[in-house]
Image (cartoon, rainbow, N blue to C red):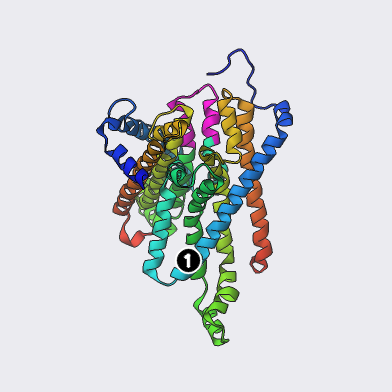
Amino acid sequence: MSLVADVLVWLGDKAHYRGDDGVLHRLAVHLEVTGAAVGIACLVALPTAVWLGHRRSRVGGLVVSAANATRALPVFGVLIVLASTSLGTTNKSAVAGLALFAVPPLLTNAYVGLRDVDPDVVEAARGNGMSGAQVLRAVELPLAVPLIAAGLRTSVVQVIATATLSAYVGGGGLGQFINEGFGRGDQVETAAGGVLVAALALAAELLLAGVQRLVTPRTATRP
Amino acid sequence: MHHLDAPNPWFSASFLQQNKDFLWSATREHLVLVGLSVAFGLLLAVPLSVLVQGHRRWSALLVQTTGVLYTIPSLALFALLEPVTGLTVTTAVIGLTSYTLLVLVRNVLAGLEGVPEEVLESARGMGLGRWRTLVTVELPLAMPTILAGVRVATVSNVALATVGIVVSHGGLGQVIFQGLYANFYRAEILTGTLLCVLLAGAAELVLLGLERLLTPWTRR
């Protein structure tokens, strides 16, 4: 398996980490794109979910179904469609496309988290003279934190994974090694890129699973 | 990048007309990729889940392993498989199969665990062996949950299969990619993307129908 050795040599070569084409710069771009996409998705999804969940609105189920239907959208196609609009082959297309796919897990989890807060608890808070806003802030949101964190974890890991495709629409990121490798027929660079991206996704998953565990009280663990 | 002088419509009837054969063959390849990957996924997930079911540690290990596979980005997986299996349908199918495993394993396990203890006891009381109980009692009762997993895996893979184009076998991904390389020819890109969405919708409906056929007792 000389390929494995070659990939290890590639990954160990400091020259591959420096400069604008280097691992470090591309990693930074990868994380920037991810951060921007998840940030935008949070701004859209969380207030919507909190409002729907707090109101226990019947529209909520519909919104969640619609969000989940995006599963049927091919990310690759959507990114390329966006790149062929006036957004062009830039990070903007990547961010817009990835944000779209970051919304469903955030929205679904936050909505379900708020909706499923025990009605007796809400009732008790109301009985103590709390206003709707107070109940939301002091009771519902804290109880929904574990599920909101679960949604954030799913969404971040998914966007980190999918951001790999942004290399194909002129956005940057670690996917560029894979894209260039395939383009040049350079199996070593392709596989090295694959290793980097897989490692990043797994690291993010482990880290965020830890965060999720931290904010989830033992008794409130849900599957 | 764009031809500023040439029109670049989002839809073109003449494009559809002239590329009927290409679109059809890409759709066919897409169906083959999704069908094979879900079938192989079931062939792996069902026996493995049956094997580990009831053993807490092994079940956890199986779910974690398939979770790791699921977390590896598709493009990275194809990049890692390509040196071994080349630019082939095999590479695309191996990659896509690995993404079905998490949801299938989870649902098969949940389905089997949902079979009530009394039912198992009466099966035993009737003298059914381990194997017959599994085939005639447990799996049929787990069917709705298993099929729900099959639906999620199928719809996800219809969308994901497009990425297979990086190993030269992406079904409708080929249409999308060709549009990309034809200077962002919008009609081609959008046609490929929408055909994917249509296929996912059709798959969902067909599988819902199948679910009703296979589990008539769940009908209300």
Q: Position of residue B93 (x, y in %)?
A: 54, 49
Give the residues in magenta: A77-100
User: Between residues A73 and B82, which one lies in front from this camera angle?
Assistant: B82
Q: Which residue is mark 1?
A: B49
Q: Residue furthest top?
A: B5
- Residue A204, above or below A184: below
Queried whether the magenta region covers residue A63, the answer comes back as: no
Q: Which corner quadrant of the image does residue A173 belong to?
A: top left
Q: Residue furthest left?
A: A14
Q: Position of residue B116 (x, y in %)?
A: 51, 75
Left or right of B212? Residue B108 is left
Quadrant position of the C terminus of chain A in the picture: bottom left
User: Between residues B94 and B132, which one lies in front from this camera angle?
Assistant: B94
User: Between residues B27 and B109, which one lies in front from this camera angle?
Assistant: B27
Q: Element type at marker 1?
A: helix
Q: Position of residue A73 (x, y in %)?
A: 56, 40
Left or right of B107? Residue B220 is right
Q: Main secondary structure of the magenta part?
A: helix
- Residue A64, above or below A43: below
Q: Which corner quadrant of the image does residue B198 belong to?
A: top right
User: Between residues B78 and B220, which one lies in front from this camera angle?
Assistant: B78
Left or right of B124? Residue A138 is left
Amino acid residing under circle 1: Ser
Q: Position of residue B29 (x, y in %)?
A: 63, 44
**Residue A65 visible in this rendered orientation of the protein:** no
